[in-house]
Image: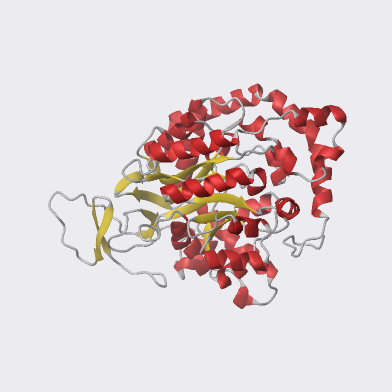
């Protein structure tokens, strides 16, 4: 046995772990699963993802976040309700196959989500069988208006075209979020819940942010947003509010133990103190932060301050896959270059294991339900086959899980006491049909969105000049790997 592992039997009754121990009494008519030769672990929990990304994964290479948002219409336009279902199901299956049993999903629609899109995404998670908190990601300000210097750089024709763009209506987006909560929060026996997601604070009016805070209070749900993911966002927020984004969110009452800030790359020391004081959470997405060149998040400082940190894959347009083992590896490696030879400050395997289990469970507001193997907890388990080149020899199993395992050894996933992956195959839906439908629709959508691709291409050089000019401005901290 590897260091820290024990042999045990599990008794699952309905949707919960009833007992853990050796030689447990087997109830009559119980189904027996022979788990010999397997590691039994709590299901991994993805603290931040985007269902809409999955149909267009693998499309981009050297894009910043601002480039990605510039291509929003090209990537997500002209989708049918069935497309939204397919994209969500595609991501859910990918997560499942690499040992993820629960997720927090901020999905989008172009020009904005609808009640039908919310229903389609929820249905996908219900059908696949994952546990999920879903939140329609919405805003009421046009993205291009949040990029300093952009409008003054655009030629008159392009400037006029951008100025004609209409933002999503504030009242309608608030009503949409509220209606989604009323209809589906707690559906599928409580396995699916609904949150509020003002997608990026800088893209939201204060009226909208205050409305989100009100809805969250009234319904007791969480708020999830992208918090200073890039230096552009941090500088725009500072200019707009005269204080950091985090300080402004605290001022209007958005920060509390059910608040989740994704990324948090450009948090200042004072921001971290505010988050800690409010009991707020950070969803760390190391692969995405690297792929988009956003910077290196201050995870050691957050942990030292007592801020809860969960682990996410982010959407497949920014980090390419939904594999939490890969996210653990990135999270265990990237922080080491920030503190040369100060190994006591490095983020390591035990930190990342806590992030992907207990930390992410708290982000989903399920700290007492999932993320740990214990009697009374939800029966969300994964089984990894031990006879594997990745798990052999099994010396220190947390080191192996964080640095070596890649998800190929996931043999079974159980959610709510139900087997939804067995022998590496999904038991709940037809995988082959899903692959075929997703491939067909992705090819159709690329053709249908040709005009949007062309518009994004025309805007790209002006956006690049504006963002480069913006990030050259001074800010109290630097999260890049080089001085700027």
Q: Position of residue 328 (x, y in %)?
A: 54, 59
* Image quadrant where one finds the N terminus: bottom left
Q: Is residue 17 visible?
A: yes
Indicate left or right for 436 with 231 as reference: left
Q: Which colouring convention does the figure follow?
A: secondary structure
- Above or below residue 185? Residue 431 is above
Q: Nearer the viewer, residue 106 or 201?
A: 201
Indicate left or right for 400 with 207 as reference: left
- In the displayed image of the protein, which residue is found farthest to the left? 28
Q: Position of residue 298 (x, y in %)?
A: 64, 65
Q: Nearer the viewer, residue 137 or 353?
A: 137
Q: Nearer the viewer, residue 427 or 78?
A: 78
User: Residue at position x 70%, y 51% from top?
Assistant: 233
* Image quadrant where one finds the C terminus: bottom right
- Above or below residue 279? Residue 65 is above
Find residue 63 and report its image quarter: top right
Find residue 451 and report its image quarter: top right
Indicate left or right for 148 with 264 as reference: right
User: Residue at position x 46%, y 70% from top?
Assistant: 395
Q: Position of residue 62 (x, y in %)?
A: 73, 44
Q: Is residue 320 visible?
A: no
- Above or below residue 92? Residue 32 is below
User: Residue at position x 49%, y 52% from top?
Assistant: 46
Q: Position of residue 414 (x, y in %)?
A: 34, 49
Q: Nearer the viewer, residue 18 or 384?
A: 18
- Above or below residue 343? Residue 436 is above
């Amino acid at each position: 046995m590897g260091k820290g592992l024990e042999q045990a039997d599990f008794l699952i009754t309905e949707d919960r772990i009833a007992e853990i121990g050796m030689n447990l009494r087997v109830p009559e008519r119980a189904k027996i699963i022979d788990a010999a030769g397997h590691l039994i672990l709590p299901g991994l929990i993805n603290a931040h993802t985007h269902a809409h990304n999955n149909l267009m994964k693998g499309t981009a290479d050297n894009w910043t976040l601002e480039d990605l948002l510039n291509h929003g219409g090209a990537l997500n336009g002209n989708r049918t309700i069935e497309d939204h279902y397919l994209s969500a199901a595609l991501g859910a299956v990918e997560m499942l196959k690499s040992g993820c049993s629960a997720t927090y999903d901020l999905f989008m629609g172009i020009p904005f989500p609808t009640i039908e899109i919310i229903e389609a995404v929820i249905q996908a998670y219900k059908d696949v069988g994952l546990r999920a908190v879903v939140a329609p990601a919405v805003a009421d300000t046009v993205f291009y208006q949040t990029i300093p210097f952009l409008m003054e750089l655009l030629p008159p024709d392009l400037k006029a075209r951008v100025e004609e763009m209409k933002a999503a209506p504030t009242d309608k987006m608030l009503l949409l979020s509220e209606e989604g909560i009323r209809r589906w929060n707690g559906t599928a026996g409580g396995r699916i819940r609904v949150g509020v997601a003002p997608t990026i604070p800088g893209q939201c009016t204060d009226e909208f942010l205050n409305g989100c805070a009100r809805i969250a209070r009234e319904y007791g749900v969480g708020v999830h947003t992208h918090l200073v993911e890039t230096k552009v966002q941090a500088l725009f927020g500072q200019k707009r509010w005269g204080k950091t984004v985090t300080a402004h969110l605290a001022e209007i009452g958005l920060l509390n133990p059910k608040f989740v800030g994704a990324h948090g790359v450009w948090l200042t020391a004072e921001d971290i103190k505010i988050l800690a004081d409010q009991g707020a959470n950070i969803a760390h997405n190391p692969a995405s932060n690297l792929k988009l060149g956003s910077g290196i998040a201050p995870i050691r400082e957050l942990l030292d301050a007592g801020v809860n940190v969960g682990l996410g894959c982010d959407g497949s347009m920014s980090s390419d896959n939904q594999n939490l083992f890969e996210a653990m590896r990135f999270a265990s490696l990237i922080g080491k270059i920030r503190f040369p030879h100060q190994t006591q400050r490095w983020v390591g395997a035990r930190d990342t294991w806590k992030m992907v289990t207990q930390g992410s469970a708290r982000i989903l507001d399920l700290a007492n339900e999932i993320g740990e193997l214990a009697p009374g907890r939800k029966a969300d388990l994964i089984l990894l086959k031990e006879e594997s080149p990745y798990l052999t020899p099994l010396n220190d199993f947390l080191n192996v899980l964080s640095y070596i395992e890649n998800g190929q050894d996931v043999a079974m996933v159980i959610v709510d006491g139900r087997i939804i992956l067995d022998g590496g195959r999904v038991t709940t839906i037809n995988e082959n049909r899903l692959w075929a439908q997703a491939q067909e629709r992705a090819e159709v959508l690329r053709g249908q969105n040709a005009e949007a691709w062309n518009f994004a291409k025309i805007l790209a050089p002006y956006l690049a000049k504006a963002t480069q000019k913006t990030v050259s401005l001074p800010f109290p901290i630097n999260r890049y790997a080089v001085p700027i």
